Amino acid sequence: METIKASPSNRRENKWLCGAIPALLIHCSIGTVYCWSIFSQEIADYIGFSKAATEWAFSIAIFFLGMSAAFLGNIVERDIRKSSLISTITFAIGMAGTGFFIYYGGLHKGSIVALVGMYVCYGFIMGIGLGTGYLSPVKTLMLWFNKQKGLATGLAVAGFGAAKAIASPIMQSLLNSLGEGGIYKMFFILAAAYFVMMFIGHRLLKKPDDWHEPQKKEKGQGILAVLKTRPIRNYIGIWLMFYINITCGLALLSQEKAIVKCIGMASVVALVSTMSAIFNAGGRLFFSAIGDHTKDRNTIYKLIFALSIAFNAVVLITGGIGNGAENKISAILVLILIMVVNAGYGGGFSNVAPLLSDHYGMGSISTLHGITLSAWAFAGLSGNQLATWIVNHFGQMIEINGHMVNPTGYQIVLYVTAVLYLVALLLSVILVRPVKTITDI
């Protein structure tokens, strides 16, 4: 049994400098992966490919985020200094490499080398940086904020969620001011800036001095044995409800701009995007902070799913998406749904590591958290594609205020996500059973 006996003064002096600040530096850097929609069309135009072809770079990045977290979680477990350095290097190289292949694509329009090179750099290499960077600060924060694990992880992943709101105007400004070739120049500038931020975070990140990281022989059991300390259906339930929450979130968020245009609010698309990012980050802090004061942290997931079902139902019953352009109340209800889903999407991320620690302890939390993030990898592929398939196969495109949109398709997306949220709620009730918090951390 491992224990922490850090003195209160030691924690007061170090938990922000060694835990919170480096976590924010790292997560505010890697979280900019969600800024993809800002420049995806510019990339497609510059290298001579369709937007649909370039979109796979983002999907691949999210896939490898989850898979690298799953397979490299043991490295994070053993040595956060090594894992945070790997993240810093691969994220910066991936971003700079993306800039190079965009530059190459501009010289050779329609070059498959440019497209594949971007997949490799933005998708695979940056994906490794995303996965290891996402995991590296989490356990450290839970050790420093031992009695507020949810708030600690919420603080870290709030930086990931807020990165879009912070970086979006900066990126747009760079694109507007750098002139010809601004799209690839922006990537070079950001690669250097984020390398500096993440390297500082890497140097500051440190576990409490009196935390003894158990060696393999001390742990005495592998990750499978840890999972078997609870009924295996328990972990399956956690994985599935985490996967469904991300899938539903991405399905709606991938259509966010089109839905906002559909309800006649095209002029404030950028504002809505910023607000949704703020709610995403706020949900990570809000739901995780509440989780610290519940007897069963799974209650948070039940709340997230119940709220998502309720607001989906309200919009569906009122026909909000189809009526939004003519009815301000319907439009407001749609905007509220977007914010609620964003908050729940973020809250699902911030609560999964504390939920796992409550059920399985802290000894192998980085490895277990990493394996669970594989749900993110598969949701990153299924969420966007599910919504796109629905919109392409149901309803038809019509013109609303000069924009081509598909109200019927977006409504069907809501029907599907409402059903999936209901499935997730049932899983959280039936499979994930309450457990007395494990204290052998």
Image (cartoon, rainbow, N blue to C red):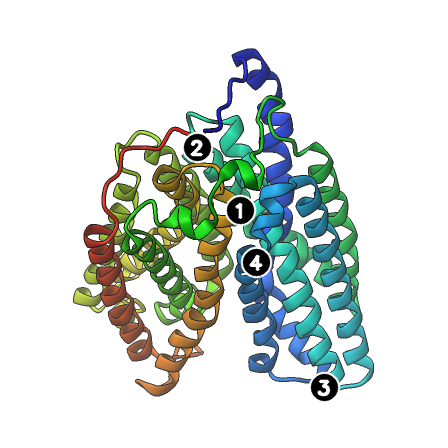
Report the residue marked by disc 1: 162
Which type of secondary structure does the marked residue at label 2 adopt? Answer: helix
Q: Residues within 10 Å of mark 1 (few under 14, many from 20)?
A: many
| N-term mark: 3 or 4 | 4
**Earlier along the polypeptide chain: callout 2 or callout 1?**
2
322 and 428: which is toward the camera: 428
Q: Which residue is the site of mark 3?
A: 112
Q: Secondary structure at mark 3?
A: helix
Lower sequence index among marks 3 and 1: 3
Where does residue 160 sit, x and y in percent of width and height?
54, 48
Residue marked by disc 2: 149
> Label 1 to label 4, Cα distance in Å?
26 Å
- Asked if the residue under mark 1 is in contact with the one under mark 3, i.e. CB atoms within 8 Å, the reply is no
Give the Cα separation between the discs numbered 2 and 3: 46 Å
Q: Amino acid at mark 3?
A: Ile
Q: Is residue 141 left or right of residue 47?
A: left
> Which mark is on residue 71?
4
Q: Relative to 254, is 195 on the left or the right?
A: right
Q: Amino acid at mark 4?
A: Phe
Q: Amino acid at mark 2?
A: Lys
Work out how far the residue at label 3 is from the one at label 1, CA to CA, in angstroms: 34 Å
Q: Nearer the viewer, mark 1 or mark 4?
A: 4
Q: Residue at x 79, y 60 (%)?
A: 188
Q: Can residue 230 be seen in the rendering of this structure? A: yes
Q: Nearer the viewer, mark 3 or mark 1?
A: 3
